[in-house]
Image (cartoon, rainbow, N blue to C red):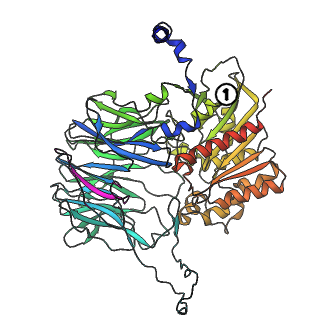
């Protein structure tokens, strides 16, 4: 009893001292981190269903359940439980039922229906393939969805009949499509995503489309007689992969009508409350590396299409109509912050909420989602540098944080402090935004080692959001700098296209200027600088070590090393050569070589590790292997870490994220100056 009283007295008298009892994050803590995704507010705005994501340390799985909470934050409770994947909740238009996906019964992913008054649940599908994008009919009687339909690809290779009982190898695989593999999916089964409709009473889904093309997520017309969807149904879709249109499909007779026709991607149709208009996103394609996605509105028959965001220089995403039909809500990234915007039909844009994010647990990417009710209440993923995504709400300008999923973990773990920083690039004095993360219990009078961490894309953006990777590096005693150099999104089309047909050339000056600006603050040891990045950040890391020897060591993760091989070997050969280069590789090999880090391997003296997933089809492992072999031939200290079963998204499994961080830290610790 005496000891308990001492502890209580200590906590009351010295709460600041209690903070010193906290310890720094450990790699295993990844398994303890949770986050909110896909918040779906009820049509009346009174309840929110959200996906609660968690991890199982014994099975190395990412798992999820559905939770429901009142809009004011009260009565927060689970709708589903168990070590399942329950996700993609969607309210019926009257709010009486929801659809969701789950593998709860036999490990097979199915579409389920839940009645909200009784919470009774029943599976609607038992199909070999998984229903994907789903939409309720307005009368609640039907659901439309996309689903993959296999289609046998006839081979011209004919083998003789094998003798009875003979054990031959599997027959050869015959491939004749341009896109024959995809990152995260591997070598693709022949077939396409088609549209289906299914009664909510159950039964057999009815296939509505049969073309040799993929179909995007459907929405119902107001009278439930038609579906609107996006797809690229052009004959040359393999060679023009970004030329999609909005289509209308008659549910009864299957006829399809194109509602848009300009050259460029049209996608994400959203029907106005009265059914008279369709909003969608897209742009006039000029084959630039980065083109701002704009907001369009047309009549539901396809007439009078017009852009309404021409004066808004940010990418429009996740478009949803206001209840009165006089405007549209959407999300956008602006200088590293994700926001909810509102546009009138005349194109006047205002900001309603900020600080969305938190869906990228590993690295600090701007990823978020929101939904809006008929009463103009909002539910969204609330971001922040101190926590992964929690549930946030906004009503009449007032924002509330509803959940605090990681308070239990962070009650005994310290986090590094994140501070925004701007600097001028030495190349053209352009303003560059970045963030500095200092170790827990930071002392500005000490000298710390530093890690420059570079984002991928390259047309992506980092922001003021939580990152487990960055925090783990800070916990290991490093100051971390991450930034948005030229080419990053969230700063407008001109800034993004500064790297058009030039990447990764002048990002280098942006990044080195950031390192210099941080060194000027006085608490970083200039002899203990390290650099790493993944994908596009791997390109830049490999480029940096070919340009300077100021870094003690580098980790190049899942990079492009040779642009000539990459554009022909990646999972989207119809895209990269056309948008990122002016000509095909054999038409202008010099431009490919000049922009390839491999061309500068003769300059590299920095100890460099290669880190890659063995099943990466976006920046295939051969890219890393080329650099590894070249560095070995140059007698540069190097190593390669291959993560088994991992795709380009190395961190798809919790242990893979841990393996990535452990590899980076081990390489840097090997070369860190401890004097």
Give the x, y percent position of residue 510: 65, 38
Image point 66% across, 28% down: which residue? 477
Is residue 504 in sight in this rendering? no
Q: Which residue is mark 1?
A: 518
Q: Is residue 500 magenta?
A: no
Q: Is residue 113 magenta?
A: yes
Image quarter of the C terminus: top right
Classify residue 246 as left or right of residue 374.
Answer: right
Q: Which residues are magenta?
A: 102-124
Residue 231: quadrant of the picture = bottom left
Q: Residues within 10 Å of mark 1 (few under 14, many from 20)?
A: many
Image point 52% across, 49% down: which residue? 653
Give the x, y percent position of residue 112: 27, 55
Is residue 198 in sight in this rendering? yes
Classify residue 522 as left or right of residue 302.
Answer: right
Number of marks in the rendered image: 1
Image point 63% across, 21% down: which residue? 442
Q: Compared with residue 460, is residue 124 higher up or lower down, i.e. above or below?
A: below
Q: Compared with residue 432, is residue 487 higher up or lower down, i.e. above or below?
A: below
Mark 1: secondary structure: helix
């Amino acid at each position: 009893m005496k000891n308990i009283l001492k502890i209580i007295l200590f906590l009351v008298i010295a709460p600041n001292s209690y903070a010193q009892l906290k310890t720094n994050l450990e790699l295993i803590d990844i398994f303890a981190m949770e986050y909110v995704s896909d918040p779906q507010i009820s049509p009346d705005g009174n309840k929110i269903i959200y996906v609660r994501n968690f991890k199982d340390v014994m099975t190395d799985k990412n798992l999820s359940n559905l939770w429901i909470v009142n809009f004011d934050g009260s009565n927060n409770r689970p709708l589903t439980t168990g070590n399942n994947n329950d996700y993609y909740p969607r309210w019926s238009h009257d709010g009486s039922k929801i659809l969701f996906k789950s593998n709860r019964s036999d490990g097979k992913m199915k579409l389920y229906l839940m009645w909200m008054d009784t919470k009774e649940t029943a599976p609607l599908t038992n199909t070999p393939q998984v229903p994907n994008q789903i939409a309720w009919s307005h009368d609640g009687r039907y659901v439309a969805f996309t689903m993959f339909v296999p289609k046998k690809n006839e081979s011209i290779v004919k083998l003789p009949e094998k003798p009875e009982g003979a054990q031959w190898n599997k027959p050869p695989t015959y491939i004749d499509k341009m896109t024959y593999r995809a990152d995260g999916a591997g070598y693709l089964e022949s077939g396409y995503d088609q549209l289906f409709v299914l009664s909510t009473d159950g039964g057999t889904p009815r296939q509505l489309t049969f073309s040799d093309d993929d179909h995007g997520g459907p929405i119902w017309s107001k009278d439930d007689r038609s579906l609107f969807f996006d797809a690229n149904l052009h004959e040359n879709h393999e060679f023009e992969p970004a030329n999609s249109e909005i289509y209308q499909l008659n549910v009864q007779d299957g006829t399809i009508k194109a509602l848009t026709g300009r050259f460029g991607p049209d996608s994400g149709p959203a029907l106005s409350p009265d059914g008279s208009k369709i909003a969608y996103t897209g742009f006039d394609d000029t084959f630039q590396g980065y083109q701002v996605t704009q907001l369009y509105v047309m009549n539901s028959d396809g007439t009078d299409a017009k852009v309404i965001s021409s004066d808004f220089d940010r990418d429009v995403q996740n478009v949803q109509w206001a209840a009165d039909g006089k405007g549209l809500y959407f999300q956008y990234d602006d200088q590293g912050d994700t926001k909810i915007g509102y546009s009138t039909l005349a194109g006047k844009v205002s900001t309603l909420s900020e600080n969305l994010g938190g869906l990228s647990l590993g690295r600090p990417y701007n990823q978020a989602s929101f939904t809006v009710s008929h009463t103009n209440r909002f539910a969204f993923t609330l971001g922040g540098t101190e926590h992964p995504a929690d549930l946030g709400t906004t009503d009449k300008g007032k924002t509330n944080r509803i959940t605090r999923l990681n308070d239990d973990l962070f009650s005994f773990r310290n986090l590094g402090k994140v501070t925004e920083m701007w600097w001028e690039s030495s190349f053209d004095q352009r303003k560059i935004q970045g963030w500095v993360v200092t170790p827990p219990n930071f002392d500005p009078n000490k000298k710390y080692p530093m890690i420059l961490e570079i984002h991928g894309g390259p047309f992506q953006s980092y922001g003021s959001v939580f990152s487990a990777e960055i925090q783990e590096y800070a916990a290991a005693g490093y100051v971390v700098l991450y930034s948005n150099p030229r080419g990053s999104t969230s700063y407008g089309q001109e800034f993004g296209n500064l790297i058009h047909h030039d990447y990764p050339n002048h990002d280098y000056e942006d990044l080195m200027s950031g390192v210099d600006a941080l060194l000027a603050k006085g608490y970083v040891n200039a002899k203990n600088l390290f650099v790493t990045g993944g994908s596009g950040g791997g390109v830049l890391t490999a480029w940096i070590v070919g340009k300077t020897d100021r870094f003690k060591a580098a980790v190049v993760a899942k990079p492009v090393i040779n642009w000539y091989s990459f554009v022909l070997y990646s999972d989207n050969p119809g895209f990269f050569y056309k948008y990122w280069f002016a000509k095909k590789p054999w038409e202008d090999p010099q431009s490919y070589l000049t922009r390839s880090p491999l061309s500068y391997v003769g300059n590299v003296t920095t100890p460099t590790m290669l880190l890659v997933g063995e099943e990466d089809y976006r920046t295939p492992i051969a890219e890393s292997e080329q650099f590894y072999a070249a560095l070995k031939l140059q007698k540069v200290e190097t190593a390669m870490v291959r993560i088994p079963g991992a795709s380009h998204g190395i961190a798809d499994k919790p242990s893979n994220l841990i393996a990535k961080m452990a590899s980076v830290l081990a390489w840097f610790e090997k070369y860190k100056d401890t004097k």
